[in-house]
């Protein structure tokens, strides 16, 4: 049975009842129909005196192009915790339309471990990503409008890009202002995908509306004739952007197929942004539940590293337990096995691929000093011998492992993992950051590259060296870094799956995201506007004769 069919055949509870389960009153909920809602901003303040629940982070090894099921495992874990009598809540990101119509498909879990309504969440949902797109492009329009009417701020170079929530490689580099008007100055521009917009990051890192407005005003949009930064506040744009984002800033409430409450809010990518759901959703969930299951995008080298060094550093939070998701197919893929052969049994490739998983686990334990369990997300093509090989190898490494069957069995298939998480979360741990804020930018980059990725060295382009010096001179050297890197390898080369040492990280450029409060470090050949694959998922999406959406997976 297809994911969409399973979701459609499950009767959902009214969203007001889902809210009542965790103490959210009806007057704190803005309903979008019967099955999804917004939670008003004051809900967190109303419950601020509550103690925080346990925070559980779900991350993974480096994924295959199809992903490894972190969301499915997260949902199965939360449902499993509820089956064990715990009050659990999910706090996850919203899907981007780019992957939905691209190669990965939807981002609402799979099988019997899904959040619902599946179609709505994967498509327009409550309009959050559209609001972020509108705010981003309003700022772009105000920049060009200011230049058109005389350029009082003497803007010389515009660095702010437009955005769109689809994969469209043709928009990476464009030319604008080609209408022939004497006031229109043609220039090169480009589009990012909405998930890569600084406004997406700001929405996810802001504590409240006042903080959101301040961060929007701090967005650097370019440089003037004296090479001094120009900010959104110089254009008086932050108020209008705040208005567009007012409703989007409120967390969304939905449910799993087993009626576990789920906060789905914010959707930055982890290879080009910080890859975590919103602070306001996470902190609200922690005040309402005994256990909050959240997720960081892609592998632990990207999403988890940024969760710790950016989100946890900003909030003072730390996870009580970390789940590292792996699949047999991904382990063989990272052992060099071709994707078309990935379902065939082969312990030689599996053995080589285990190095990827062990590196991630060791990072989580030894670099970040956290309590870790490996969740082996089971597929029907997995062989018993392969599963036992992974289990025995991890046990020799002193790492706990749980076989997760959430796709097939829902919360029942996540109960064993839930038991591991409950036990782990009672053990003491103390998060250790990879670098300190007082470290210089280059030291921060090299600590992540060497200690987390395992790189031998870091090479910098001349452009990146100049930009690093300029960011330092502008007073932003204290900000955490957000390394933009391929998700498929510890290296910056997506084809170097084994990431066999020695390898070099190649820094191409740096950009200070002064509004979001981090520095993006671009490595390898990374794009902030993805392209569609040769056969995009969009080709199989449509509406059947009963007006049902089909083809989303």
Image: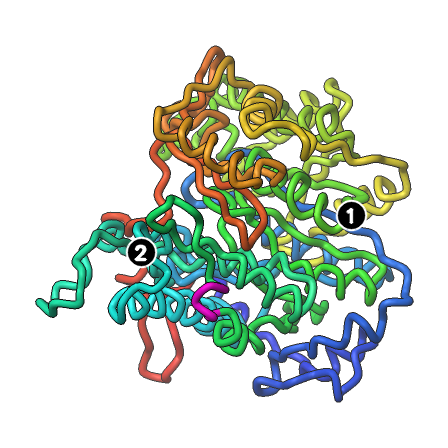
| Residue closer to the observer: 545 or 303 | 303
Please, what secondary structure does the residue beneath circle 1 have?
loop
Question: Residue 488: where, in percent of width, then height?
Answer: 45, 34
Left or right of 341 on screen, residue 305: right
Q: Which residue is mark 1?
A: 316
The residue drawn where x is 68% and y is 40% is: 308
Q: Residues within 10 Å of mark 2 (few under 14, many from 20)?
A: many
Q: Secondary structure of the magenta portion, mostly?
A: helix
Q: Which residues are magenta?
A: 233-237
Relative to 209, does residue 373 appear above or below in the rendering?
Answer: above
Relative to 332, does residue 239 appear above or below in the rendering?
Answer: below
Q: Which residue is mark 2?
A: 191
Q: CA distance from mark 2 to mark 1?
A: 34 Å
Q: Which mark is residue 433?
A: none
| Residue closer to the observer: 411 or 325 | 325
Q: Quadrant of the C terminus?
A: bottom left
Look at the image and say whether residue 323 sits in the magenta stretch. no
What residue occupies the far left of the structure in this picture?
180
Look at the image and say whether residue 235 sits in the magenta stretch. yes
């Amino acid at each position: 049975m297809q994911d969409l069919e399973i979701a459609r055949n499950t009767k959902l509870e009214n969203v007001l009842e889902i809210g009542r389960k965790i103490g959210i009153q009806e007057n704190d909920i803005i309903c979008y129909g019967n099955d999804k809602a917004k939670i008003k901003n004051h809900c967190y303040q109303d419950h601020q005196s509550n103690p925080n629940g346990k925070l559980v982070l779900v991350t993974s090894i480096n994924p295959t192009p199809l992903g490894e099921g972190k969301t499915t495992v997260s949902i199965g874990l939360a449902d499993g915790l509820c089956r064990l009598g715990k009050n659990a809540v999910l706090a996850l990101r919203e899907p981007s339309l780019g992957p939905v119509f691209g190669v990965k498909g939807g981002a609402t879990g799979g099988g019997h471990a899904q959040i619902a309504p599946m179609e709505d969440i994967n498509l327009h949902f409550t309009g959050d990503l559209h609001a972020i797109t509108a705010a981003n492009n309003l700022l772009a329009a105000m920049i060009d409008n200011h230049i058109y009417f005389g350029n009082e701020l003497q803007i010389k170079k515009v660095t702010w890009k437009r955005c769109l929530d689809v994969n469209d490689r043709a928009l990476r580099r464009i030319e604008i202002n080609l209408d022939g008007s004497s006031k229109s100055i043609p220039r090169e521009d480009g589009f990012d995908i909405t998930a890569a917009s600084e406004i997406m990051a700001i929405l996810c890192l802001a504590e409240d509306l006042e903080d959101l407005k301040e961060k929007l005003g701090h967005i650097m949009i370019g440089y003037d004739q004296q090479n001094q930064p120009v900010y959104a506040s110089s254009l008086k744009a932050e108020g209008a952007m705040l208005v567009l984002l007012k409703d989007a800033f409120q967390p969304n409430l939905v449910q799993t197929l087993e009626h576990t409450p789920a906060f789905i809010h914010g959707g930055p990518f982890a290879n080009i942004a910080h890859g975590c759901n919103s602070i306001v959703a996470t902190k609200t969930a922690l005040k309402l539940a005994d256990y909050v299951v959240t997720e960081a995008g892609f592998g632990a080298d990207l999403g988890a590293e940024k969760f710790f060094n950016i989100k946890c550093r900003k909030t003072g939070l730390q996870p009580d337990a970390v789940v590292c998701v792996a699949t047999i197919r991904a382990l063989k893929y990272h052992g060099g096995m071709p994707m078309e052969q990935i379902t065939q049994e082969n312990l030689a490739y599996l053995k080589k691929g285990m190095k990827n998983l062990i590196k991630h686990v060791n990072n989580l334990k030894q670099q970040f000093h956290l309590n870790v369990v490996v969740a082996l997300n089971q597929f029907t093509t997995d062989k018993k011998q392969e599963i036992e090989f992974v289990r025995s190898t991890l046990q020799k490494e002193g790492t706990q492992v749980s076989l997760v069957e959430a796709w097939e069995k829902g919360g029942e298939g996540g109960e064993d993992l839930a038991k591991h998480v409950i036990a782990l979360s009672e053990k003491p741990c103390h998060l250790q950051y990879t670098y300190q804020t007082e470290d210089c930018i280059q030291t921060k980059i090299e600590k992540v590259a060497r200690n987390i990725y395992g790189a031998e060295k870091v090479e910098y382009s001349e452009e990146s060296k100049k930009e690093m010096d300029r960011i330092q001179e502008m007073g932003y050297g204290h900000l955490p870094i957000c390394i933009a890197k391929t998700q498929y390898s510890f290296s910056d080369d997506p084809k170097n799956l084994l990431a066999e040492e020695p390898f070099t990280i190649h820094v191409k450029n740096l950009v200070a995201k002064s509004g979001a409060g981090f520095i993006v470090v671009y490595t390898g050949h990374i794009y902030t506007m993805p392209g569609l694959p040769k056969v995009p998922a969009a080709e199989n999406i449509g509406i059947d004769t009963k007006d049902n959406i089909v083809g989303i997976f």
